[in-house]
Image (cartoon, rainbow, N blue to C red):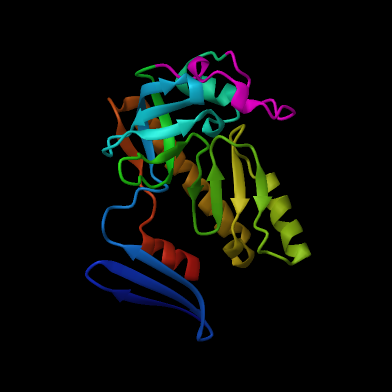
Amino acid sequence: MKEILINVESKEIRYAFMHFNILHDLIIERKKSRQITGNIYRGQVRNILHNIQSAFIDIAEGENGFIHINDIVENRKKFEAMFDMDFDVDLADKKSSNRSKGDITKLLKIDQPVLVQVVKESIGTKGARLTSNLSIPGRYLVLLPNTPHRGVSRKIENSSMRDKLKKLIRAFEMPKDMGLICRTASANATTEMLIDEATQLLRIWEDVVSKFHTAKGPKLLYEEWTMLKKAIITCI
């Protein structure tokens, strides 16, 4: 039997994940500030640092976020189509390990709108760490809008189940250059449940893209689950 024990204090919340009365995991969320990790934004490039191949992006969350060239989507054609630009650097060349040797000024321009996701909270005067390799998690699946990879969680150890899930997600009709990852909980889901969730995640992504193109200036487009929702989703 799985349980979640929640202890709420004035400055922090503790989540204990119990499995047959044994502590499986403990998460402490300090209430000093709102968490934005996982959120997707329509950002705007404010400054480009050629010497470290990085840029600062305004996401309307206080300090500008920070993105490195290695955190810009690998699929060049997808990136070009999304931002209606042509790039001189081919980040899709997987045979090359020289992505960091590219020129970020050929990828990003001052005031350019970009679609980014927070991967690390801001600390002090340092803004949030950003990526253009986006992911949208569900209960059973994770949608990778810019990455054409399909895989199964390593926590699913049963080989026949892994093979079944691999065949299933390979058979999904997905837009080109998108990927799916089966989470651990997918082992207990029916085919219909997985198809329904994949459809739901695609709708979320379509909504994000629509908001990106209609928004003016930096704006939050998708908000990641709160820690409580994550706890419930993980434990169910």
Residue 79 in sight in this render? yes
Q: Is residue 37 left or right of residue 167?
A: left
- In the rendering, at what x and y percent does residue 158 appear? 74, 67
As drawn, 160 above or below 198? below
Q: Is residue 6 left or right of residue 194?
A: left
Magenta-drawn stretch, dominant element (helix, strand or loop): loop
In depth, the one of 49 and 114 nearer the eye is 49
Residue range highlighted in magenta:
88-109
**Where on the picture, by quarter, is residue 165?**
bottom right
Q: Is residue 43 left or right of residue 3?
A: left
Instruction: Tell me what residue is drawn at x 65 percent, y 41 percent.
Output: 149
**Where on the picture, by quarter, is residue 225?**
bottom left
Q: Is residue 105 magenta?
A: yes
Residue 236 in sight in this render? no
Residue lying furthest bottom: 21
In depth, the one of 109 and 139 nearer the eye is 109
- In the rendering, at what x and y percent does residue 204 appear? 43, 43
As drawn, 26 above or below 56? below
Q: Is residue 3 left or right of residue 194?
A: left
Instruction: Tell me what residue is drawn at x 35 percent, y 45 percent.
Output: 122
